[in-house]
């Protein structure tokens, strides 16, 4: 099998069916561009939501207990799987925090030293609201614990919104991918139909289906390569120039996982795979249906 012939025919296929190829490339370009934009925006929204979730703290208020009981409670808290950080706030520290947060006017109230000691807990919010609620219920039964406070409602709302966002975003991405894949499929199908006489002639001289469909697959890969490259350029332009210029208040959106090449590589690989799969799908089906007898 001549690699040179296959690659040459792949380029020739694009030249022969310029309108169909342009439509396919444009569709792939829009699909990959939209997915790239959605991925970067979605990543930043997710990070922001996780930052808000990480700010949710659990505070365990204590009765007026001795130091031994306080240390026992600390040990119990530190042994919990979901608790990442334990900070003890004494009664004096609680009064100092009150003065700092409320300023002048609370001095006399703070001097009463009526605020209870507490433990402020940093928890793993990735564990989910249900597991955290179960842990809190268990901690309420500890000897010396008066009350436990945390924003359960906010945690549940954030968790629900993140699940909804993930579900909707995934659905939109699948629809975009499917639409682009079908357009590549139709483009290759039209190209095969236009070359049906040549395909029959090649079959007459003994060419295998694999040999015949290889140029069409190369054509699909080339379409994916062109579309992916254009989409990457547009993503750079949108996020590095357009958004900072027109939406300066929005700031600079970070790249997924902190590096530009992760998203760029994903976009290029996705575009190539879509071009390859769409063309392979069409070529396998329609070349087999092209009979020698015509």
Image (cartoon, grey):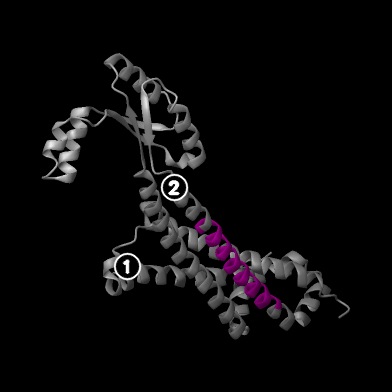
Q: Nearer the viewer, residue 127 or 193?
A: 127
Q: How many marks?
A: 2
**Going by the image, does 75 lie left or right of 129?**
left
Residue beneath the point at 46% across and 36% down:
132
Please state the horizontal and vertical placement of residue 188, each as a whole percent of the image: 67, 75
Q: Is residue 87 visible?
A: no
Specify whether residue 120 is painted magenta: no
Q: Which of these two is toward me, 253 or 136?
A: 136
Q: CA distance from mark 1 to mark 2?
A: 37 Å
Residue 173 inside the magenta-drawn segment: yes
The residue that appears at 70% across and 66% down in the rendered structure is 281
| Magenta stretch secondary structure, dominant | helix
Q: Position of residue 98 (x, y in %)?
A: 19, 39
- Comes first in the chain, label 1 or label 2: 2
Mark number displayed over residue 240: 1
The image quarter containing residue 86 is top left
Q: Position of residue 165 (x, y in %)?
A: 50, 58
What residue is rendered at 48% in x and 42% in y?
129
* x 16%, y 37%: residue: 109
Q: Kindly identify which residue carries mark 2.
A: 153
Q: Horizontal placement of 168 versus 188: left or right?
A: left
Q: Tell me the tag on residue 95.
A: none
Q: Nearer the viewer, residue 11 or 151?
A: 151
Q: What segment carries the magenta color?
A: 165-189
Q: Is residue 55 above or below residue 214?
A: above
Helix, strand, or loop for circle 2?
A: helix
Q: Is residue 246 above or below residue 251?
A: below
Relative height, residue 289 to residue 92 (above, below) = below
Question: Which residue is situated farthest in the right direction here?
Answer: 293
Percent across and percent down for residue 111 are: 13, 32
Classify the position of the C terminus by image quarter.
bottom right
Q: Residues within 10 Å of mark 2 (few under 14, many from 20)?
A: few
């Amino acid at each position: 099998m001549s690699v040179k012939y296959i690659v040459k025919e792949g380029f020739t296929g694009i030249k022969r069916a310029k309108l169909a190829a342009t439509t396919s490339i444009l569709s792939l370009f829009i699909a990959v561009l939209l997915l790239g934009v959605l991925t970067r925006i979605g990543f930043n929204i997710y990070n922001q939501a996780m930052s808000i979730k990480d700010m949710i703290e659990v505070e365990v208020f204590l009765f007026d207990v001795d130091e031994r009981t306080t240390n026992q409670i600390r040990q119990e808290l530190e042994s919990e799987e979901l608790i990442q950080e334990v900070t003890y706030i004494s009664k004096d520290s609680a009064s100092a925090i009150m003065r700092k947060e409320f300023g002048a006017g609370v001095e006399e109230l703070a001097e009463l030293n009526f605020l209870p000691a507490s433990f402020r807990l940093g928890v793993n919010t990735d564990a989910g609201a249900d597991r955290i609620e179960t842990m809190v219920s268990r901690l309420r039964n500890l000897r010396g614990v008066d009350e436990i406070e945390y924003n359960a409602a906010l945690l549940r709302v954030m968790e629900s919104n993140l699940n909804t966002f993930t579900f909707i975003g995934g659905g939109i991405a699948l629809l975009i991918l499917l639409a682009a894949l079908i357009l590549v499929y139709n483009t290759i199908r039209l190209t095969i139909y236009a070359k049906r006489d040549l395909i029959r002639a090649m079959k007459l001289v003994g060419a295998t289906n694999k040999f015949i469909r290889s140029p069409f697959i190369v054509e699909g890969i080339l379409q994916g390569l062109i579309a992916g490259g254009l989409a990457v350029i547009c993503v750079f332009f949108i996020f590095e120039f357009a958004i900072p210029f027109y939406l300066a208040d929005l700031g600079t959106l970070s790249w997924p996982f902190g590096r530009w090449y992760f998203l760029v590589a994903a976009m290029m690989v996705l575009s190539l795979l879509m071009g390859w799969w769409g063309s392979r799908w069409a070529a396998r089906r329609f070349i087999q249906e092209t009979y020698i007898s015509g």
